[in-house]
């Protein structure tokens, strides 16, 4: 039986590693280019993106800026600064705001131009329309030089250094609430010596869960998760060595805190546990089976390792405390440790 468990565990780990390797081989989304097109009536800026498009946009003032955060985009290959000086836009700046966020900033005139944003296949289009003087007089030329003098302070190092503060203030806008699905497996190691004598020191488990993330800051989350596992094992009674079968279904409701460190996202939390159990006994026993449930609590620590923004490998350790005394004054102890690996 130990060889069987080892084989199944190795197979599960190899499947997870193969899947993560396949995902790593995919192209990482990036901002490949920025195209600026001027016409008589409008300015069109095209953000060319390889991969899935997901973004947030907002405006900042004093000085005036339009900010577009490209979520789940890690790299950009376009120029970091592009001078425009038309239609109320002085320049376009690009930088990495977070490990998985590329920020595009449009520096605007004192009078913010009207604009619209369209999400098209493979690109984001931003259209600027500025009020121009009526008649044939070409006033835009003098107006273009004035924004350069007005925006000269942001170009200088003293004006550029406050930018991280502006990004941090805009952090709650860039990261929203999210829902994740967790799938994995591992080993459940019971604390009870009686359990170990009958079923061994560990049993395989398969798990499925869902987590709701609430951002606390740019790098911190509060998570609420509902997880369930399926544990099934066979053993032999201690005296007659007859076969018995045990099925455990623990359900956990947990709250945890996690912090982002690039591709690593460690977390820790606590939760309530509910164990449903069923033990099928040999025919020689008076009862064919024993069923019931036990309530308890658990502690967990773990980490996510980001493969791509939408997928991560999760390694987790959870300790359960779940005991009760039945009507025959027999202690049922399902406490133990759970070590798992999976995808989220």
Image: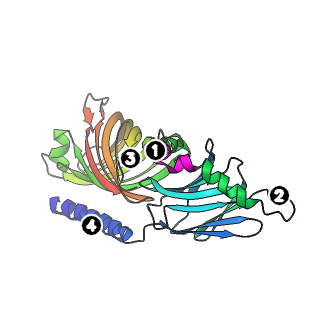
- In this image, 315 relative to 132: left or right? left
Mark found first going from the N terminus, 1 or 3 = 1
x, y (%) of residue 131? Answer: 79, 56
Q: Which residue is mark 4?
A: 14
**SS of the residue at dot 3?**
loop
Disc 4 versus disc 1: distance between alpha carbons? Answer: 47 Å
Label 4 or label 3, whichever comes before in sequence order: 4
Q: Where does the image place residue 289, in percent across and percent down from the top left?
A: 32, 46
- State the residue in front, 229 or 259: 259
Q: Nearer the viewer, residue 323 or 130?
A: 130
Gap in angstroms between the C-alphas marked 1 and 3: 24 Å
Marks 4 and 3 close (CB-CB < 8 Å): no
Q: For the point 28% across and 54% down, which residue is it?
A: 186
Instruction: Find numbered disc 2 in the image and state the secondary structure of the residue it sits on.
Output: loop
Which circle, 4 or 3, is nearer the viewer?
A: 3
Cβ atoms at labels 4 and 2 below 8 Å apart: no
Q: Which residues are magenta?
A: 152-161
253 in magenta: no
Residue bearing mark 3: 260
- Name the residue at 38% across, 36% down: 271
User: For numbered disc 4, what is the local secondary structure?
Assistant: helix
Q: Image height check: is 127 above or below 288?
A: below
Indicate the secondary structure of the residue bearing disc 1.
Answer: loop
- What main secondary structure does the magenta stretch of the protein show? helix
What residue is rendered at 80% in x and 58% in y?
A: 132
Q: Residues within 10 Å of mark 2 (few under 14, many from 20)?
A: few
Camera-nearest label, 4 or 2: 2
Residue designated by label 2:
133
Looking at the rendering, in which quadrant would you find the N terminus? bottom left
Circles 1 and 2 in contact, beta carbons < 8 Å? no
- How packed mark 3 is, by other alpha carbons closer than 10 Å (few <14, some 14-19, many 20 or more), is some
Residue 284 coordinates in the image, percent (x, y): 23, 49
């Amino acid at each position: 039986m130990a060889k069987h468990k080892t084989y199944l565990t190795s197979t599960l780990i190899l499947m997870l590693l193969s899947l993560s390797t396949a995902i790593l081989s995919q192209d990482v989304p990036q901002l490949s280019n920025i195209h600026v097109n001027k016409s008589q009536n409008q300015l069109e800026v095209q953000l060319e993106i390889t991969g899935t498009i997901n973004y947030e946009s907002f405006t900042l003032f004093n000085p005036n800026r339009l900010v577009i955060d490209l979520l789940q985009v890690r790299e950009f290959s376009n120029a970091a600064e592009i001078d425009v000086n038309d239609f109320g836009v002085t320049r376009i700046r690009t930088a990495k705001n977070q490990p998985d966020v590329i920020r595009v900033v449009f520096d605007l005139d004192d009078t913010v131009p009207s604009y619209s944003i369209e999400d098209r296949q493979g690109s984001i289009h931003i259209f600027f329309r500025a009020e121009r003087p009526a008649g044939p007089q070409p006033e835009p030329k003098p107006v273009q030089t004035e924004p350069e003098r007005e925006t000269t302070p942001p170009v200088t190092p003293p004006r550029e250094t406050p930018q991280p503060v502006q990004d941090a203030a805009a952090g709650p806008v860039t990261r929203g609430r999210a829902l994740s699905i967790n799938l994995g497996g591992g080993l459940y190691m019971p604390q009870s010596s009686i359990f170990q004598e009958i079923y061994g020191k560990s049993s395989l488990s398969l798990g499925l869960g869902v987590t709701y993330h609430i951002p606390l800051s740019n790098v911190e989350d509060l998570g609420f998760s509902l997880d369930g596992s399926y544990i099934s094992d066979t053993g032999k009674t201690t005296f007659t060595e007859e076969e018995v079968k045990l099925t455990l279904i623990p359900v956990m409701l947990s709250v945890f805190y996690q912090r982002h460190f690039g591709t690593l996202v460690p977390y820790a939390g606590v939760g309530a546990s509910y164990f449903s159990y069923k033990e099928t006994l040999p025919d020689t026993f008076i009862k064919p089976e024993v069923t019931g449930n036990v309530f308890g609590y658990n502690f967990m620590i773990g980490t996510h390792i980001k493969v791509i923004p939408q997928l991560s490998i999760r390694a987790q350790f959870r300790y359960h405390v779940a005991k009760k005394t039945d009507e025959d004054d027999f202690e049922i102890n399902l406490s133990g440790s759970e070590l798992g690996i999976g995808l989220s």
